[in-house]
Image (cartoon, rainbow, N blue to C red):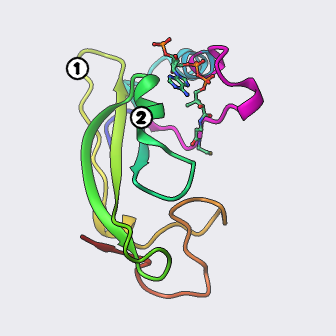
Amino acid sequence: MGDNVIVMNCLWILRKAKGHALGKHLLKDMIDSEGDADGFATITLENHWSPWFVKWQMEKLDFKTIESTKVAHKTKHKEQIFSIYLMWVPITRNAKPPSWNKEKLLEGETFYHVHPLYLSQAREGNVFEPK
Ligand SMILES: CC(C)(COP(=O)(O)OP(=O)(O)OC[C@H]1O[C@@H](n2cnc3c(N)ncnc32)[C@H](O)[C@@H]1OP(=O)(O)O)[C@@H](O)C(=O)NCCC(=O)NCCS
């Protein structure tokens, strides 16, 4: 949640195309095409078993940490505590850092089954617990 901050839902360069500055070009294209935005936010993960949303990769694209929280999945890899980071790229000098709803985050998401924070719709309640 934020004031004139846009959520970057996904940025993905296929493995065979990596290392050619395409990630940077895509990011620049997003920033240029949303010229009025004060910043862009996303989430990243550390110590999660998925190859997606890896924190250091987004840091390479200049995303900075605002806040983080440690959680574990309630059923999968239960012992593996991982961190979720709220990150952003501010664009304007007066940009205000966005925030997030940590309680809602614990519910997981239901729209994409390979998302690292996916919750099967068959399940009820939180899929993650705070650590
Ligand atoms: C992060 C990602 C977008 C980078 O794309 P890319 O086109 O390979 O990156 P670029 O060539 O633009 O490089 C950007 C910077 O990261 C660095 N970098 C990229 N991959 C790196 C690697 N494996 N090791 C070290 N540095 C790396 C580059 O050196 C560059 O840094 P520099 O500006 O200091 O030179 C790409 O790795 C990716 O798609 N990862 C998966 C993202 C994801 O999880 N998406 C969610 C799924 S929807």
Where does the image place residue 34, in percent across and percent down from the top left? 53, 22
Range covered by the magenta-colored residues: 6-24
Could you tell me how far apart the alpha carbons at marks 1 and 2 are, in whole angstroms? 26 Å
Q: Is residue 18 left or right of residue 123?
A: right
How packed mark 2 is, by other alpha carbons closer than 10 Å (few <14, some 14-19, many 20 or more), is: few
| Residue appearing at x 40%, y 29% in the figure | 59
Q: Nearer the viewer, mark 1 or mark 2?
A: 2
Label 2 residue SS: helix
Q: Is residue 13 above or below residue 25?
A: below
Asked where in the image residue 17 lies, by quadrant, the reply is top right
Which of the marked residues, 1 or 2, is nearer the chain's N terminus? 2
**Circle 1 residue:** 94
Where does the image place residue 4, in percent across and percent down from the top left? 37, 33
Q: Quick check: is 12 in the magenta stretch?
A: yes
Q: Quick check: is 48 in the magenta stretch?
A: no
Q: Is residue 51 above or below residue 113?
A: above
Quadrant containing ligand 1: top right
The C terminus appears in which quarter of the rendering? bottom left
Q: Amino acid at mark 1?
A: Asn
Q: Is residue 124 left or right of residue 131?
A: right
| Residue appearing at x 56%, y 17% in the figure | 24
* Residue 128 in view: yes
**Circle 2 residue:** 56
Asked where in the image residue 101 lies, by quadrant, the reply is bottom left
Mark 2 CB lies closer than 8 A to ligand 1: yes
Foreground: 121 or 59? 59
Q: Residue furthest front?
A: 79
| Residue appearing at x 31%, y 53% in the figure | 100
* Residue 1 in view: no
| Residue appearing at x 55%, y 56% in the figure | 50
